[in-house]
Amino acid sequence: MKNATLSVSVLVVLALVMIFVGCAKPPDAERQAAKAAMDATISAGADKYAAADLDAAKKIWDTSESQMKDKKYKEAKQSYINAKAAFEKAAQAVETGKKALTDQANAAIATLEESWKNVEATAKKLRKKLKDREAWTTDAKAISEGLAKAKEMIAVDPSQAKAKLDDLKTMVDKWENRFKEMGARPAVSGQEKARQEGTSKEAKGFTIARMVVGTGVENSEPLGISEAFPGVTEKIYCFLEATDIAKDTEVSFVWFHGENEITKTNLPLKMGPKWRTWAFKNLRGAKGEWKVEIKDADGNLLKHVKFKVE
């Protein structure tokens, strides 16, 4: 009788051990299913069109992986099941997000095309006033081609199309604002032009005696003065000599590459018979047309100098 009781006890213990071992088995099948759902969701473009849902699913996945590492297989199994469901939800959200972005891109391109049409019409009217025609021609071509390309991209990748349209809008806005300034700018008489370029001492309280660009300054004198510099030139200095300065003031050196303002440096002019000052710009390999404008403390243009980096 004792032997029979012992045998039953052993069988019970063995059964419990088998149950425990079965529960302790890693949930590999659930992990593989969740991983497949994750890969499919990412391939569908969830990172672009359902980013929030994808991030939520990834957090559940990370929890599953952590539980798997700690050998909490029971918890990990349920977490993998939850992660799979979350990835499938994100995959369903992709189509909704893609459609919303497609609608946004279509609306953006319609608005941008109308704006661009108006800018082109304005450019024709102000063509004689346009100084940097090369920059306009280059940008006009890029915008026209970019709009056509964006239309093609919408059906395939509305996210990328929307990003391209945002870049094009920046270019269109730049020319729209520039043409507005040109259209609002009144005709300048010879006397007014002379004042702006620094020949009227009364307007600003000093006279610009010299304004040149070169490759350096030594002992308060400009070096390497030229209107064209080789492409390997690292820095360009703009040197200014003012005379008959009625009171302490300041001037701005405003640097342009093409028609784009790059940087501005404010420097003082001290009262007295003469004051020399200069600013420099690191070219960083930027070739093409450059210009430096000198403006007074009120922002009025006094004089400019142009140079080319070849």
Image (cartoon, rainbow, N blue to C red):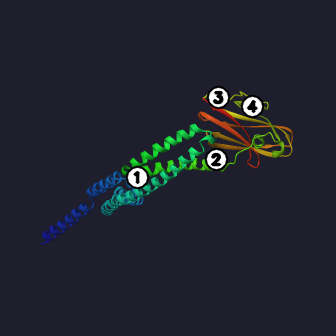
Kind of residue at disc 4: Val
Q: Which residue is mark 4?
A: 217
Furthest toward the bottom, the residue is 1
Q: Which residue is mark 2?
A: 182
Query: In the picture, which quadrant includes the N terminus?
Result: bottom left
Pick the front one: 183 or 217? 183
Residue drawn at x 56%, y 44% is: 124
Residue 58's quadrant in the figure?
bottom left
Tag 4's secondary structure?
A: strand
Vertical position of residue 271 compared to residue 19: above or below: above
* Residue 135: x %, y % from top left: 57, 39
Tag 3's secondary structure?
A: strand
Residue 22's quadrant in the figure?
bottom left
Vertical position of residue 208 compared to residue 153: above or below: above
Camera-near label (3 vs 4) is 3
Query: Mark 1 to mark 2: distance in Å?
Result: 36 Å
* Residue 224: x %, y % from top left: 71, 27
Kind of residue at disc 3: Phe
Query: Mark 2 to mark 4: distance in Å?
Result: 36 Å
Sooner in the amino-acid sequence: mark 3 or mark 1:
1
Q: Is residue 19 left or right of residue 271?
A: left
The reply to whether the C-beta atoms of the residues labelled 1 and 2 are less than 8 Å apart is no
Q: Which residue is mark 1?
A: 158
* Residue 63: x %, y % from top left: 38, 59
Camera-near label (1 vs 2) is 2
Sooner in the amino-acid sequence: mark 2 or mark 4:
2
* Residue 65: x %, y % from top left: 36, 56
Q: Which residue is mark 3?
A: 229
Sooner in the amino-acid sequence: mark 1 or mark 2:
1
Residue 30's quadrant in the figure?
bottom left
